[in-house]
Image (cartoon, rainbow, N blue to C red):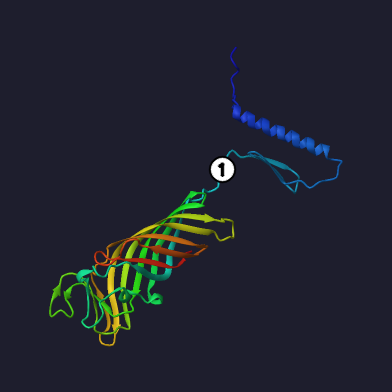
């Protein structure tokens, strides 16, 4: 038999499921109100949430409204980055070196002054308190390897070393050799000068990349972590100059190639609490390319944010 003509509609299963849920909640709420009619009134919350269904009781007329929210947004906590970056780290310290030169085998690199002792290790000794090291790190980054307790650390910056001499020695890139009756040299050399200097230093500046393995403890909130790092650094010599001050010549700053090694490899380390650390470095090879065997080291304080 055919169905009689007229309007008809179909209820989707999902809609029927929601209507059934709403009716069931309404019955439960009505029963709960009837059972508590003779008891002492207890203040109830104005809003009840069951999954995506929210029941709101209005204070004024006591009516209830039921809202079904089909939108669900999951807010997962933001994942903590494994990489940390410090910008503008500054080192302030001292520069010095160990001298292992065999002065009997330096050849023509050292030029002696007639009537004076031959240049030796005493002439290359430094004014310790005035020989300084300043490092300017553009950035320092560290990658967490094991729960921020073990990290890989690296950076990029300028390593600036000033070696302040006690004696009156001078550097020459080439040119006439003093006290030699007009002889000329095409190679750099050091000679004992004929005047006294109130300031006499060799500056050696490097573009340096450090890489370290970092260990850190005590990551509790409000506590300064204790850290210790050790590794290596590689530097490229981009500037070398002999800066002097005297009454006879005034201030002089002579740039040139003084036989310093172009590349510098060092063992490095740091230790400390929070933003202030103690740092040190030591180069196992000579800072000079040929004649001299002088191995530089630095130490001081590191300041970071």
Residue drawn at point x = 20 percent, y = 69 percent: 107
Circle 1 residues within 10 Å: few <14, some 14–19, many ≥20: few
- Judge left or right: residue 266 versus residue 17: left
Image spot of residue 142 (x, y percent): 45, 55
In which quadrant of the rendered view does residue 120 lie? bottom left
Q: Is residue 240 left or right of residue 132?
A: left
**Which residue is most to the right?**
38
77 over 99 or under it: above or below: above
Label count reads 1
Q: Residue furthest left?
A: 182
Where residue 89 sits, quadrant-wise, is bottom left
Q: Which quadrant does the N terminus fall into?
A: top right
Closer-to-camera residue (304/191): 191
In front of the other: 122 or 275: 122
Q: Identify the element where label 1 is drawn.
A: loop
Identify which residue is drawn at 34% across, 73% down. 163
**Is 233 left or right of 55, judged from the image as shown?**
left
List the residue tagged with mark 1. Answer: 74
- Residue 223: x percent and y percent? 58, 60
Residue at 19% x, 71% y is: 108
Q: State which quadrant residue 180 falls in.
A: bottom left
Identify which residue, 33 or 240, lies in the foreground.
240
Find the residue positioned furthest to the top. 1
């Amino acid at each position: 038999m055919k169905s009689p003509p007229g309007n008809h509609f179909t209820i989707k299963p999902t809609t029927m499921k929601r209507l059934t849920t709403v009716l069931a909640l309404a019955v439960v709420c009505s029963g709960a109100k009837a059972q508590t009619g003779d008891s002492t009134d207890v203040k109830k919350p104005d809003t009840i949430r069951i999954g995506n269904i929210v029941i709101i009781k209005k204070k004024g007329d006591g009516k209830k409204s039921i809202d079904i929210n089909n939108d669900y947004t999951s807010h997962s906590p933001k994942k903590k980055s494994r990489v940390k970056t410090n910008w503008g780290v500054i080192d302030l310290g001292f520069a010095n070196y160990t001298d292992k030169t065999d002065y009997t085998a330096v050849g023509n690199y050292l030029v002696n002054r007639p009537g004076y002792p031959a240049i030796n290790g005493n002439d290359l000794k430094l004014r310790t308190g005035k020989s300084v090291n300043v490092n300017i790190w553009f950035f320092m980054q560290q990658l967490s390897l094991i729960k921020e307790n073990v990290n890989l650390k690296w950076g990029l910056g300028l390593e600036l070393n000033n070696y302040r001499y006690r004696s009156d020695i001078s550097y020459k890139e080439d040119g006439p050799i003093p006290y030699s009756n007009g002889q000329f040299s095409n190679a750099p050399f050091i000679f004992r000068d004929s005047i006294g200097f109130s300031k006499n230093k060799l500056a050696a500046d490097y573009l340096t990349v450090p890489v370290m393995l970092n260990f850190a403890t005590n990551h509790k909130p409000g506590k300064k972590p204790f850290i210790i790092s050790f590794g290596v650094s590689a530097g490229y010599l981009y500037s070398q100059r002999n800066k002097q001050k005297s009454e006879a010549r005034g201030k002089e700053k002579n740039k040139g190639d003084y036989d310093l090694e172009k590349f510098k490899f060092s063992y490095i380390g740091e230790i400390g609490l929070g933003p202030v650390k103690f740092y040190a470095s030591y180069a196992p090879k000579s800072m000079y390319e040929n004649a001299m065997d002088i191995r530089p080291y630095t130490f001081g304080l590191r300041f970071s944010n």
